[in-house]
């Protein structure tokens, strides 16, 4: 009995409530004529789209840098990569992996600086990360306008220069992963095998990394910097590594997102993405300073499930678009809950 | 030392003052409501259907010393007023001036004042203006962005897609 | 001791302001705007924004950093205005009505914020920021779904055609610029809203007086060192909550003043950037997370808004695209906040190190200091 | 004086924490205007006594105390320090509780400011009253007057020399009109000689005004100078309560440390032969908060156990922390003739030194991780142990298997009480946590092992075990050990030589067999001057 109580307190009521809520949604779905199979494949799809962003939270949380509100830095790198790939007219496999490969160097460089910065401001990481992210996005907004891209599908027709807000990647690498070995059942259920495989693989690599010497050191730094230091591990170096890693994952994440969504979204689009990812991993049961693969998978699934099901179910029951509000309240509520929770690390 | 301070935590005076404050608050709300209540007055210069009174052609109506509204026979003019008590001055072409006082009901927004009635002394000169008014169409709720994106006022209107449509 | 600061130190202290002045000065000529125009803009925007920025002061005194939770106050103010419009209360009375309605709501909101922030000591800012998002959800729930559905709305003109929920943009015709026009001084081709400025000055006086009170002193103490203050018997948590409540209420009034000047209200977005602009302004003015003064506020508002007025045109003229200026000012806004937060965090670490160095070889250092101190 | 009835009387006070007695039947009295010197080693019970006097919550939480504390003959038991303050007892702590950004005045009257009520009081309560700065200033000046020292009422604390901070603290206590009893805990610890002098004078002034003072200090000569009576605590017993007149520093010193119990000691201790010097330290300074090392030189020979003793805050802890690079340090350190790069824990570890920190929970352990992690981590990071190559060594993964073996090995060797190697470190008892720390250090197979306060906060049985373990490793593997401890007895039980650190310098190095009073003198910084010479010889 106590054990269960303990488990519940660890897991946290909000998460349990959300979970129950989601289950109810699925139960309710048929009664309001929402196709379960459609919903499920929808959830799977969004899960795949966002999982990498959520995964990107893990290294920084583990290294004690808190929640990466500055994920947009990585996303920007990803956008640069993908736009370049389109610019060079790479298609299908080349397009996708081209985008990934092109974006990684940017991600590494950005991440390195970003990490150095965060090391200078220990304790204030989250607030600063957020604003560094915002500033970065805004800076790129200017860049998107003046960089000399000229792919006809990419730039504003009338101005003849400046990238569009949304660039279609139809004919480049749209659904490259989604359609890879995709399983279709009926006409409304699609299992995006390729994407989920890719996500699984990424998660596996992360799992491996956490078991290497460096990964171990990284976790130790997050758990007790002084202990790590006394054992000859440089906390700053580990933190930087974690930030770089997170940024790279963010970059790859956006490319995966695009290939499934079908468009490259530029300008202010990346502003909100970090928050969704943060909310997701917290819903998955992570705290501000401990996160695991399980948190990632559970979180991404719960959160995306919520985002998909609430509109379809709630709206069709209440005949209103209230789901948007539900989502704002839930996702921000969970973040606040995590922030106000006594940090679990005993010092 | 702190002992020097009047220790009056639970003093009845203090309680009274606070209660008084609440009263003042409520009073203030009421006051500004009454004083600030806006009314739209339709000043009208038409004959009565039953010809019980006749419109005067060419009058200047000025309310509360505002500059006058010119009304010819059959005219209707809108006047925005604040508060309930107003003085109406009607001036005929022949220069004959007359002042009247009108009182508007607090809770009504849209009223009509028939000047001929007023001049003929037929009560009530001011009546609630009845016509079905429905909300103008268009202009629905647009972007209530997930995290109320701080980029709110960026980008040319409608350029940034609000929500990614779930594929 | 602090009197003799090195030049370099001075620059790090004021880096933000300096950078900013440079950018602005560079941008003015290329915008091609007349000084006349810019000055008029400044007068208007001072009246419009200063009150909001002043609302940030107290939490900073209380060591709670920049109160991103002020957005909650702004929302309360908007609810007040919605009701004022709904009941068609016009003119200054309308504003007062809105303020009176907004006050209890913002007090409640302030209490909530304070309570939450006390649970998140050390990360007040990010928490406050997220809280603003969270409450924004509640706000939408109330305004977009409950008004006209649970709470009766008598003026159909402000309702969505579906019969409940407030329209996306509200026309504040009744109260538009009523405060500004209440006492408008036309001098030398400039229109100066005296009444508005009087309100702002009144607030400044209040703040100055407040710092002289016991409560103000306690806030300073809490801001400097919570543990010591607590040991001395100052009710730390309570003091922090009070600071936030006052700030929230002020933000509520500030938003009302802001909107009456704008004349229209984007029901669901008007508050999005309240804290962003206010915070950016006060930081540009040379304030830091721990230290802020009334001059910081005025300098900040002027600097920030000169830039905001100038850049779109400058962008237009330089790159042939107004959007660039638009983005640029956003970038500057966020950049400034990030920069000054970084500088602050970085500097406080430096000071800590310097302090430790002072401790090395105490015996050597302290003797002269003692005699010198004794001499005073 | 001395005739009127006592302000404070402590009657048969006893206190025990979880079975081990820290105070036993302590009695003494204090009259107005009297200065009582309270001396004793660390852990003699001074702190606990004061905690009882001030009604600190810890006491109640740990089962209260026996005996009576009487103020003016009436028994009192305070629920919180604030009650004690109201009863007129003031406390000046070792570490300052002042607000740096505030002026002297503001700090002196902190939260007791003089105020003028304002109109808003009735609306929002008393806290809306306006500060009456002139009055505040007057009170502050009054207090400073009483103290008879020079203090600028408008100076910022942050810009003050330490001495003035100390005065400000005292001034704050005496502004309370009621304050009649003042407790000063090591007030001179942070002061320079000259400042200390001024302070003592100030104390006498206060005493003249009829304020009774309890003066806790390890600087015995100060006690002799200023106190009227001295009470010596040892192992929780008030073993001496006598007028100072005619008492010498040496007497007090011997009362402080004197033991009746003969310490059982390994037969060979003190007369063993050793190899070459393995570690040579010249003019080491370490900037460790609260444990500053100013100028220390010594050398350790292969296979010996060198002890570092001394009172808290004197710098003994700084020595290992500095050499291992955990705090900013300077000077020259040679390990087997090779220069040790300071300020880099990694280099120190790589050169074959290991460190068991005194701050077990803060630095010693990963409380939220498993024992395996705690024990194997350092070895993994420094010596690439417990990693197994994957895919032909492209990269290497944690070898959980090996880590568990290692852990089980040490769990057996040091018999660490735990449910499994996977148990989290925070769930272990203090003693077992300490063993884990030792295991971590042994796991890197060091040539030179620093052990800091190895027995702090662990029960008697565990203490013995830890000490034996150290001795065993020293004998069996020839590990050279430098052990820092505040407990003279345990140093004397296993060390071959014992260095006493005082005021950041080595006051002297003695054989464990030396007479107790000798140690006492060195600790209380008396014989410092003449002993430095001997210290350097000994280290040659």
Image (tube, coloured by chain):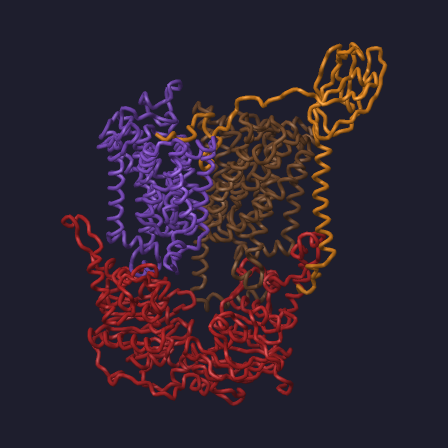
Chain colours: A purple, B orange, C brown, D red
Question: Along the line of sight, which residue is nearer the eye, C211 or D404?
Answer: D404
Q: Is residue A71 above or below residue A11?
A: above
User: Considering only vertical position in the picture, is D207 above or below A245?
Assistant: below
Is D180 positioned to the left or the right of D496 in the image?
A: right
> Against A186, is A299 above or below?
below
Image quadrant in which the C terminus of chain B is located = top left
Identify the residue shown where x is 62% and y is 32%.
C260
Q: Position of residue C75 (x, y in %)?
A: 56, 38
Judged from this view, the residue extending furthest toward the left is: D392
In this view of the protein, which residue sits in the foreground, D379 or B108? B108
- Residue D524 showing in the rendered view: no
- Quadrant of the image for the N terminus of chain B? bottom right
Q: Residue furthest bottom?
A: D246
Residue in the picture at 40% in, 80% down = D522
Res. D447 in view:
yes
Say above or below: D73 vs A148: below
Q: In the depicted view, which residue is nearer to us: D452 or B63?
A: B63
Rendered location of residue D286, percent (x, y): 37, 66
Q: Residue A138's spot in the image, x, y percent? A: 42, 34
Q: Quadrant of residue A143?
A: top left
Q: Is residue B166 left or right of residue D117?
A: left
Q: Residue B108: image x %, image y %?
A: 70, 27
**How many badges with numbers are in the image?**
0
């Amino acid at each position: 009995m106590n054990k269960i109580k303990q488990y519940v307190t660890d897991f946290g009521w909000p998460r349990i409530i959300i979970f129950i809520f989601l289950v109810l949604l699925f139960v309710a779905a048929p009664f309001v004529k929402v196709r379960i199979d459609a919903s499920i494949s929808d959830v799977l799809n969004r899960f795949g789209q966002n999982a990498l962003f959520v995964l990107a939270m893990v290294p920084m949380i583990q290294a004690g840098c808190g929640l990466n509100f500055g994920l947009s830095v990585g996303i920007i790198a990803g956008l640069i990569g993908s736009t370049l790939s389109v610019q060079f007219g790479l298609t299908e496999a080349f397009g996708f992996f081209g985008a990934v490969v092109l974006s990684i160097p940017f991600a590494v460089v950005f991440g390195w600086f970003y990490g150095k910065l965060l090391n200078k401001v220990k304790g204030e990481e989250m607030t600063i990360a957020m604003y560094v992210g915002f500033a970065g996005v805004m800076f790129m907004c200017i860049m998107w306008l003046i960089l000399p891209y000229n792919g006809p599908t990419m730039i504003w027709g009338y101005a003849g220069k400046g990238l569009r807000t949304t660039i279609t990647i139809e004919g480049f690498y749209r659904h490259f992963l989604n359609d890879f070995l995709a399983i279709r059942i009926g006409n409304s259920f699609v299992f995006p095998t390729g994407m989920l495989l890719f996500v699984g693989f990424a998660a596996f690599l992360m799992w491996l990394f956490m078991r290497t010497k460096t990964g171990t050191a990284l976790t130790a730094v997050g758990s007790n910097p002084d202990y790590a230091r006394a054992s000859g591990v440089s906390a700053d170096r580990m933190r930087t590594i974690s930030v770089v890693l997170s940024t790279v994952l963010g970059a790859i994440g956006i490319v995966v997102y695009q290939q499934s969504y079908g468009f490259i979204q530029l300008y202010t689009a990346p502003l909100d993405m970090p928050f969704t990812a943060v909310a997701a991993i917290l819903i998955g049961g992570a705290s501000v300073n401990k996160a695991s693969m399980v948190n990632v998978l559970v979180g991404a699934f719960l959160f995306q499930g919520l985002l998909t099901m609430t509109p379809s179910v709630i709206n069709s029951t209440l005949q209103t678009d209230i789901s948007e509000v539900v989502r704002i309240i839930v996702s921000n509520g969970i973040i606040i809950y995590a922030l106000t929770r006594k940090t679990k690390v005993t010092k | 030392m702190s002992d020097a301070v009047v220790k009056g935590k639970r003093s009845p005076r203090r309680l009274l003052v606070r209660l008084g404050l609440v009263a003042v608050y409520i009073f203030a709300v009421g006051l500004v409501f009454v004083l600030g209540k806006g009314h739209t007055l339709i000043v009208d210069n038409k004959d009565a259907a039953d010809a019980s009174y006749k419109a005067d052609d060419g009058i200047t109506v000025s309310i509360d010393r505002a500059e006058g509204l010119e009304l010819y026979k059959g005219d209707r003019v809108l006047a925005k007023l604040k508060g309930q008590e107003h003085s109406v001055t009607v001036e005929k072409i022949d220069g004959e001036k007359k002042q009247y006082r009108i009182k508007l009901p607090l809770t009504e927004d849209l009223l009509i004042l028939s000047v001929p009635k007023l001049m003929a002394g037929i009560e009530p000169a001011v009546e609630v203006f009845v016509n079905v008014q429905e909300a103008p169409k268009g202009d629905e709720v647009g972007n209530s962005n997930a995290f109320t994106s701080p980029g709110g006022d960026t980008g040319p209107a409608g350029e940034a897609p609000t929500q990614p449509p779930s594929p | 001791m602090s009197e003799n600061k090195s030049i370099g130190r001075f620059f790090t202290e004021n880096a933000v302001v300096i950078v900013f002045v440079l950018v602005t000065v560079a941008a003015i000529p290329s915008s091609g705007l007349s000084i006349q125009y810019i000055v008029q803009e400044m007068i208007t925007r001072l009246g419009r924004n200063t009150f909001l920025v002043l609302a940030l002061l107290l939490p900073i005194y209380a060591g709670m950093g920049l109160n991103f939770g002020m957005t909650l106050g702004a929302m309360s103010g908007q609810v007040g205005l919605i009701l004022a419009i709904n009941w068609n209360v016009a003119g200054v009375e309308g504003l007062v009505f809105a303020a009176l309605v907004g006050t209890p709501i913002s007090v409640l909101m302030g209490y909530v914020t304070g309570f939450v922030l006390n649970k998140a000591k050390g990360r007040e800012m990010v928490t406050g920021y997220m809280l603003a998002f969270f409450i924004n959800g509640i706000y939408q729930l109330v305004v977009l779904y409950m008004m006209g559905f649970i709470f009766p709305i008598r003026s159909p003109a402000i309702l969505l055609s579906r019969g409940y929920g407030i329209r996306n943009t509200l026309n504040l015709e009744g109260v538009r610029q009523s405060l500004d026009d209440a006492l408008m001084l036309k001098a030398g081709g400039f229109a100066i809203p005296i009444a508005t400025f009087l309100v702002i000055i009144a607030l400044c006086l209040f703040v100055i007086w407040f710092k002289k009170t016991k409560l103000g002193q306690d806030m300073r103490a809490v801001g400097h060192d919570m543990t010591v203050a607590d040991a001395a018997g100052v009710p730390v948590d309570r003091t922090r909550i009070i600071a936030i409540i006052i700030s929230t209420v002020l933000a509520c009034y500030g938003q009302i003043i802001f909107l009456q000047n704008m004349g229209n209200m984007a029901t669901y977005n008007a508050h999005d950037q309240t804290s962003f602009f206010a915070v950016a302004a006060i930081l540009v003015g040379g304030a830091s997370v721990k230290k802020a003064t009334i001059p910081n506020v005025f300098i900040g508002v002027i600097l920030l808004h000169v830039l905001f007025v100038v850049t779109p045109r400058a962008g237009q003229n330089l790159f042939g695209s107004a959007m660039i200026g638009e983005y640029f000012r956003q970038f500057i806004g966020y950049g400034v906040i990030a920069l000054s937060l970084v500088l602050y965090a970085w500097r406080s670490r430096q000071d800590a190190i310097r302090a430790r160095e002072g401790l090395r070889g105490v015996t050597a250092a302290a003797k002269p200091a003692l005699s010198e101190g004794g001499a005073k | 004086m001395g005739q009127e009835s006592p302000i404070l009387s402590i009657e048969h006070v006893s206190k025990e924490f979880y079975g081990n007695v820290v105070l036993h039947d302590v009695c003494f009295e204090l009259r107005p205007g009297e200065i009582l010197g309270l001396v004793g080693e660390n852990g003699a019970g001074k702190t606990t006594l004061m905690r009882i006097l001030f009604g600190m919550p810890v006491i109640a939480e740990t089962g209260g105390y026996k005996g009576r504390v009487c103020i003016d003959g009436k028994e009192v038991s305070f629920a919180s320090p604030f009650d004690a303050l109201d009863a007129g007892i003031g406390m000046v702590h070792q570490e300052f509780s002042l607000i740096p950004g505030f002026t002297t005045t503001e700090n002196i009257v902190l939260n007791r400011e003089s105020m003028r009520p304002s109109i808003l009081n009735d609306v929002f309560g008393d806290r809306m009253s306006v500060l009456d700065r002139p009055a505040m200033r007057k009170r502050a000046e009054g207090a400073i007057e009483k103290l008879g020292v020079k203090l600028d009422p408008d100076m910022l604390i942050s810009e003050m020399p330490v001495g003035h901070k100390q005065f400000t603290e005292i001034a704050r206590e005496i502004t309370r009109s009621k304050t009649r009893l003042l407790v000063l805990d090591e007030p001179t610890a942070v002061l320079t000689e000259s400042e200390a002098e001024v302070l003592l004078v100030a104390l006498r002034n206060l005493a003249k005004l009829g304020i009774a003072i309890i003066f806790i200090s390890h600087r015995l000569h100060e006690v002799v100078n200023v106190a009227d009576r001295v009470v010596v605590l040892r192992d929780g017993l008030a073993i001496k309560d006598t007028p100072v007149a005619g008492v010498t520093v040496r007497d007090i010193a011997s009362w402080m440390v004197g033991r009746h119990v003969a310490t059982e000691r390994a037969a060979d201790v003190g007369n063993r032969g050793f190899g070459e010097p393995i570690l040579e330290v010249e003019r080491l300074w370490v900037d460790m908060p609260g444990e500053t090392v100013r100028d220390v030189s010594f050398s350790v020979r292969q296979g010996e156990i060198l002890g570092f003793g001394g009172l808290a805050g004197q710098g003994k802890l700084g020595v290992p922390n500095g050499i291992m690079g955990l705090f900013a340090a300077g000077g020259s350190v040679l390990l087997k003739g090779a220069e040790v790069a300071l300020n880099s824990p990694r280099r120190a570890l790589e050169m074959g030194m290991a460190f068991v920190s005194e701050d077990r929970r803060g630095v010693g352990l990963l409380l939220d991780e498993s024992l395996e992690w705690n024990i194997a981590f350092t070895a993994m990071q420094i010596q690439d142990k417990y990693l197994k190559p994957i895919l032909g060594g492209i990269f290497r993964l944690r070898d959980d298997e090996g880590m568990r073996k290692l852990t089980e090995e040490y769990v057996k060797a040091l018999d660490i009480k735990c449910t499994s190697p996977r148990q989290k470190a925070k769930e272990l008892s203090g003693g077992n946590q300490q063993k884990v720390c030792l295991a971590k250090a042994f796991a890197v197979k060091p040539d030179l092992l620093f052990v800091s306060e190895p027995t702090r906060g662990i029960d008697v049985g565990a203490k013995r075990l830890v000490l034996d373990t150290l001795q065993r490793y020293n004998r069996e593997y020839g590990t050279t050990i430098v052990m820092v401890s505040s407990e003279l007895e345990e140093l004397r039980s296993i060390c071959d030589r014992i260095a006493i650190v005082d005021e950041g310098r080595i006051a002297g190095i003695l054989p464990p067999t030396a007479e107790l009073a000798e140690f006492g003198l060195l600790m209380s910084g008396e014989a410092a001057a003449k002993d430095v010479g001997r210290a350097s010889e000994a280290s040659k």
